[in-house]
Image (tube, grey):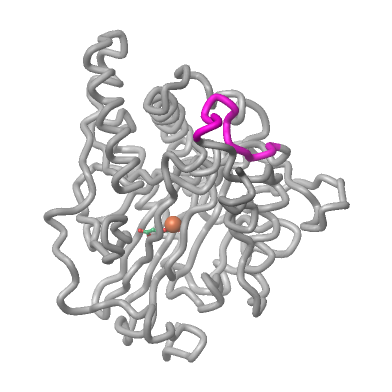
């Protein structure tokens, strides 16, 4: 990536605090999922987990989980394969680069809020191919497919990716059950959105050392647009979360063999804002590279996302107009691809103003 070109430079108000960042100690909640994995029939233990998830989702929109049931060796194997993949010359990585027909594969030019991110990425889906609208245009009903692009010279990458995503998907379903219960819904309330044709994808992120960590970000401030994100990070650290209580950026402490879970925009809408998707960003540093692996759990492309009817009442009327998830996702990808000088599509574009409710 060489010199820091102006494309990477954040506006002054969005630059990270390299010194004096808020301590990690009072950071996001840590939840031990042992009961969910080992004694799912112990109602009392599950109730208390549900209460922890409710409070963490409400106060922070982020939490970490341990004893989550994803075997550590699957993560280690994937990390090793990812290091090998990113360690190759650029022309080798570009053999599996993303293109306009399928956004899966390798790329190093993602923009978040129109500023370039200091990172390189490899995206893949577990349910391959993934059905997706052919265009962002609302009147175009054609559906197309995204297919994975696997490097031929590194067959172990494919195996490691597939095994890992399968294990994390199980965790995702379990977490969605806890979240459903925490909203007073039946445990399987969200299941149907993910049964067929889910658009879930996993990303391998590499953040190279950066000569100007005070000017650039690994990922600029953003909210995740899916339902739930399950993130593995290494021991370098750099993820920051915007604390809901006061808007301060808080570092997320790397905890060995923990996953970071965050509520995405879709749960914000489904829950009619009982829970909110929270802004986060990634700092880079001048010495160490950092790896992270987010798993973005997202429903089928034809899902119309809107507040669940059980959570809409006279006192709490619906806060969103329904939107089509596939079109939303394709519109997002398009603007990541093309550095458009307009704001990305956001769920607030579907927000119903308060006074129109009454
Ligand atoms: O690398 C990280 O810690 C987070 C990455 C992230 O927020 C994203 O890819 O959406
Ligand atoms: Fe994110």
- From where the camera sits, is residue 296 visible? yes
Picture coordinates of residue 281, whole percent (x, y): 38, 65
Q: How many marks?
A: 0
User: Quadrant holding ligand 1?
Assistant: bottom left
Picture coordinates of residue 104, whole percent (x, y): 62, 55
The residue closer to the viewer here, 32 or 131, is: 32
Residue at image position (56%, 67%) is: 107
Residue at image position (57%, 30%) is: 308
The residue closer to the viewer here, 283 or 210, is: 283
- Whether residue 304 appears in magenta in the rendering, the answer is yes
Picture coordinates of residue 215, whole percent (x, y): 36, 85
Q: Is residue 221 above or below residue 146?
A: below
The residue closer to the viewer here, 337 or 160, is: 337
| Image quarter (top left, top right, bottom left or bottom right) of the C terminus | top right
In the displayed structure image, the side of residue 247 where residue 171 appears, left or right: right
Q: Is residue 27 above or below residue 75?
A: below
**Main secondary-structure element of the magenta-colored stretch:** loop
Q: Which residues are magenta?
A: 303-315
Residue at image position (19%, 48%) is: 255
In the displayed structure image, the side of residue 320 where residue 259 appears, left or right: left
Residue at image position (25%, 32%) is: 52
- Whether residue 355 appears in magenta in the rendering, the answer is no
Kindly indicate the quadrant of the structure image that contains residue 195.
top right
């Amino acid at each position: 990536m060489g010199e820091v070109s102006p494309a990477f430079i954040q506006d002054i108000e969005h630059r990270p605090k390299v010194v004096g960042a808020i301590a990690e100690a009072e950071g996001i909640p840590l939840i031990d999922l042992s009961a969910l994995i080992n004694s799912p029939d112990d109602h009392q233990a599950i109730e208390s987990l549900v209460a922890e998830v409710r409070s963490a989702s409400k106060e922070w929109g982020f939490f970490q989980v341990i004893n989550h049931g994803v075997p550590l060796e699957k993560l280690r194997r994937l990390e090793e394969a990812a290091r090998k993949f990113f360690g190759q010359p650029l022309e080798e990585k570009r053999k599996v680069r993303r293109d306009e027909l399928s956004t899966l594969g390798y790329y190093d030019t993602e923009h978040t809020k129109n500023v370039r991110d200091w990172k390189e990425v490899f995206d893949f889906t577990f349910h391959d191919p993934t059905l997706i609208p052919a265009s962002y245009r609302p009147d175009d009903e054609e559906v197309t497919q995204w297919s994975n692009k696997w490097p031929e010279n590194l067959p172990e990458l494919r195996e490691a990716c597939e095994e890992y995503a399968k294990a994390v998907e199980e965790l995702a379903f379990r977490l969605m059950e806890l979240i459903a219960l925490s909203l007073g819904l039946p445990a399987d309330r969200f299941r149907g959105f993910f049964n067929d044709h889910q658009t879930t994808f996993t990303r391998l992120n590499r953040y190279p050392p950066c000569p100007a960590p005070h000017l650039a970000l690994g990922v600029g401030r953003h909210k995740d647009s899916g339902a739930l994100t399950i993130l593995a990070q290494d021991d370098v650290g750099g993820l920051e979360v915007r604390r809901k209580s006061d808007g301060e950026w808080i570092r997320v402490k790397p905890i060995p063999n923990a996953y970071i879970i965050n509520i995405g925009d879709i749960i914000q809408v489904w829950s009619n804002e009982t829970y909110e998707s929270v802004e986060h960003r990634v700092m880079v540093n001048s010495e160490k590279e950092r790896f992270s692996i987010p798993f973005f759990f997202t429903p089928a492309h034809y899902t119309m996302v809107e507040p669940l009817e059980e959570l809409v009442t006279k006192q709490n009327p619906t806060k969103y107009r329904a939107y089509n998830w596939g079109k939303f996702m394709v519109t997002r990808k398009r603007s990541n691809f093309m550095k458009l000088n307009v704001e990305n599509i956001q769920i607030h574009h579907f927000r119903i103003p308060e006074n129109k409710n009454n």
